[in-house]
Structures are given as C-alpha cells and as structure tokens.
Image (cartoon, helix red, strand yellow):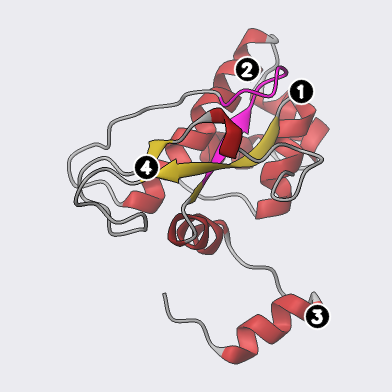
Amino acid sequence: MLVRGRAISEWECGTIQPKLGNLIEWSGRLHYRFVVLGQDGEPLRGPSIRRPGEAWEHFERRRLASPLRNRRMALGLSQTDLGRLVGVSKDSVQRWELACVPPRPIAHVVWAQKLGYALGLWRVRSQRGTRICGSCRDGGPQMADSETRRRPGRPGGF
C-alpha cells in the first residue's frame, strides 16, 4: 500500500485520521488481525469464509461487524438506540452492520465499547503459501496461539 508522506504527517499531527481499510491492511502486513473481543477478552468469531469475488477488506469489515450486530440484537437494542449511544444515525449503524461503509476507526472502537466489547489485535500465522495482507486469495490468515494476542490495556489493544 502506497501512502504519501504528507498523509502520514497529517495523521501524526491529528489533521486527518487513517481509514479502517488502511488499518486492516497494515495490521495484516504486520501479522496481526483486528478482532472483536468479548467480555471475557477472547476474540469473537464472525464469518470465516469469503464470498466469491469479495475483496479482502470488505470481508474483514464484515467479519468485524457480525459479532457487534449479534450483540446489539441480543441486548434488544434497535439500530436507532445504538446510534444514539454511539452518536451516529440509524442509517450509519445499518451501513456499518452490512459492511457497506466502514466506520471511522474511533467510531468502531466506540461501537464495540457501547456493546460491552472491545477491539484488539490478534497475532496471526500464515497458512502455507499465503500472504497476510489485502491480496490474500484463500481465506486469509489463521489465528495464532492465545499467548500472542493483544488485549485492551496492553500495547495493541483498544
């Protein structure tokens, strides 16, 4: 992924924020994967198989959205209720849950927190012959052992 030096400077100064797609790809290149952590600190599983022709970034957004949507429904919250808690519209929540539009990274963190969950980074190990990045073709990386995970409160947790 090519990034202009100016963009990095603007991120460092807080002028603009990197997009979720940037963070997904960079974490993959560093052999990590964003995960939704349940109340017990364990990663929650979303869809594990990419749809035919589905881009890696879209699959990752869908994988992150699924446990959050399931939690919202289990709590009996409507999309409107959750939108009020997060500070966005019902339409934004709907687009996030359907992985149509990625939330800003900070909104994704707040979305998880308002549902009692957290976002974190999980160390992955590559399947034979795969690369851990946006160009994976065969379902992507596998989760590694639990000793290598990043939890909230530790470096890499949110």
On the image, which quarter does residue 10 sit in? bottom right
Picture quarter with the N terminus: bottom left
Quadrant of the rendering where the C terminus is positioned: top right
Name the secondary structure under disc 3: helix
Q: Tag 1, which secondary structure? A: loop
**What's the distance in space between the residues labelled 3 and 1, CA to CA?**
30 Å
Q: How far apart, in angstroms, are the residues tagged by discs 1 and 2?
A: 9 Å
- Along the line of sight, which residue is nearer the eye, 94 or 73? 73
Q: From the viewer's perspective, is residue 80 above or below residue 129? A: above
Q: Earlier in the sequence, mark 3 or mark 1?
A: 3
Residue 127 in the image, given as x and y percentages of width and height: 27, 43
Image point (49%, 27%), residue name:
66
Farthest front residue in view: 147
3D distance between C-alphas at marks 4 and 3: 30 Å
Q: Amino acid at mark 3?
A: Cys
Viewer can see residue 73: yes
Name the kind of residue labelled 4 in the image.
Answer: Phe
Q: Which residue is mark 4?
A: 59
Of the image marks 1 and 2, the number of the one nearer the N terminus = 2
The spot of residue 15 in percent (x, y) is 77, 78
Determine contact: label 4, label 3, CB under 8 Å. Answer: no
Question: To which residue does mark 2 refer?
Answer: 71
Q: Three-letter amino acid code at disc 1?
A: Gly
The 10 Å Cα crowd at callout 2, few under 14, some 14 to 19, many 20 or more, is some
